[in-house]
Image (cartoon, rainbow, N blue to C red):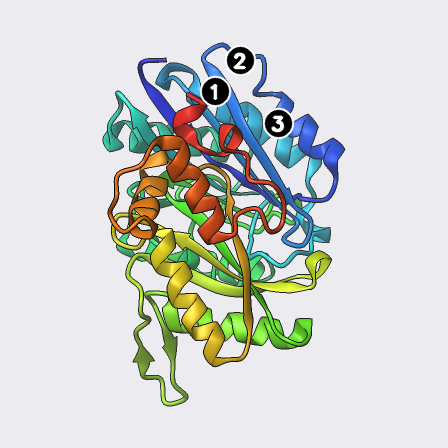
Amino acid sequence: MNRIIECVPNISEGRDKNKIELITSVLKDIKGIKLLNVEPDADYNRTVITFVGEPEVIVDAGFRFFRKAVELIDMSVHKGEHPRMGAVDVFPFIPVRGVTMEDCVRLSKELASRVGNELKIPVYLYEYSASTPQRKNLSDIRKGEYEALPEKMKNPEFKPDFGPSEFIPKSGASVIGARQFLIAYNVNIFRENLETSVKVADYIAKNIRESGYKLPDGTRVAGRLKAVKGMGVELKQYNIAQVSMNLVDYNTTGMHTAFELIKEYAAKESAEVRGSEIVGLIPFDAIKKSALFYSGGREITEKEAINLVIERLGLNYLYPFEPEKKVLDLMV
C-alpha cells in the first residue's frame, strides 16, 4: 500500500470472543484492508481493533464494521470499567502514509454520514473533525457516559452531527473523527489490596494528566504532563490497578516520561509499579525515543531498542509483548 490510513475503532465488548470474531471478520476479505490487531480486555469490557487501508475502501470497510458491531452489541446490558457511550464507542482515522489529515477528516465525515443516516445511530465528530471547539475532546463528549445520554440528548446543544437526535438504547451513540497517532499506555499499580491500589492509581492519574483536577472550591490544579489524558482503573483479573493513559502526542510526552513520573508518585504512596502495557499498536519512533532515554542517548539497533524498552517499561508483565504484532512499522 502506498497510501495508508489507520483506523482504531473501540467496541464495547471485551468478553464474548465469538462476537468479537464475527465483528472483526467483516474486515478480513476486503481488498485493500489489512486487519493488524484485536485486543480485548475483559475488565474494561472493551476491544481495541486496529486495521489499515487505502482511502478508496476505508469508509466502506468502516461501515461494514459498524453495521455488524451494532447488530451484535446491546449497550442496555453493557457493564465495564472503561468510559463508553456506544456499541462502537469511538472510531478514529489516522494518517500513516501518503495521506493528509484533511483526507482523514473528509473520510471520517463520510463514514459519520453513512452511519447516522443509514444505521440511524447518533454520531458526534471529534478532534480534527469536530464541528465545534466544545466537541474536540472525546472526554467532553463522553461525559456521563451511556447512562447520561437519555437526558443529554434532550438538550439542543448536544444534538448529534449526524443521525437521530434521540437516545437509542441498543446502540448508544458513537464518536467518529480524525486524529494524530495516539498511544494507549497503562502503568500497573499495586498496594496492599485492590481497593487501595485503585485509589492510588486514581490519585496519580489526577496529578499527572494535563487537565489535572478540581479543588473543592472549583479551582483547577493543572497536571504535570502535557498531552496526556488519564484515569485510575481496576483490573480484577490481575488484582492490580492501572494508571490508564492516552499519550496524545508522544513527541511531547513519551512513555518513559510518564512511566518514570508514575514511579515517583507510587513510591511516595508506598505502592509498587508492576510494569506497564501498550494497548493497540505503537510506531517504532515512539519506542526509539524511549530507548534513547534509557540508553543515555546512545544509538542502538532497532532490535536492541525494542528489547530495552520492553525491559525497562516492564511490557511483559501482564502478557508477552510481541513486537511483530505490536509495532506498526513491522506490520505494514
Task: Tell me the crowding category of disc 3: few under 14, some 14 to 19, or many 20 or more residues within 10 angstroms, Cα based.
Answer: some
Check disc 1 and report the residue beneath it: 60
Residue 30, numbered label: 2
Residue 323, x across and y down, in percent = 49, 33
Residue 312, above or below 62: below
Which residue does the image show at 45% across and 52% down from the upper left?
312
The answer to whether 131 appears left or right of 40 in the picture is left
Q: Residue at the top extreme?
A: 31
Q: Secondary structure at mark 2?
A: loop
Counting residues from the start of the chain, the first of labels 3 and 2 encountered is 3
Disc 1 and disc 2 in contact, CB within 8 angstroms: yes
Q: CA distance from mark 1 to mark 2?
A: 9 Å
Which residue does the image show at 28% across and 42% down from the upper left?
128
Disc 3 and disc 1 in contact, CB within 8 angstroms: no
Residue 24, numbered label: 3
Whether residue 297 appears in this view of the structure is yes
Residue 25, x across and y down, in percent = 64, 22
The residue lying toward the viewer, choosing from 3 and 218, is 3
Q: CA distance from mark 3 to mark 2?
A: 11 Å
The residue lying toward the viewer, choosing from 276 and 61, is 276
Task: Tell me the crowding category of disc 2: few under 14, some 14 to 19, or many 20 or more residues within 10 angstroms, Cα based.
Answer: some
What is the three-letter code of the residue carrying label 2? Ile
Which residue does the image show at 37% across and 41% down from the upper left?
287
The quarter holding residue 125 reads top left
Residue 136, x across and y down, in percent = 32, 51
Residue 214, numbered label: none
What is the three-letter code of the residue carrying label 3? Thr
Residue 221, x across and y down, in percent = 32, 78
The answer to whether 50 appears left or right of 97 in the picture is right
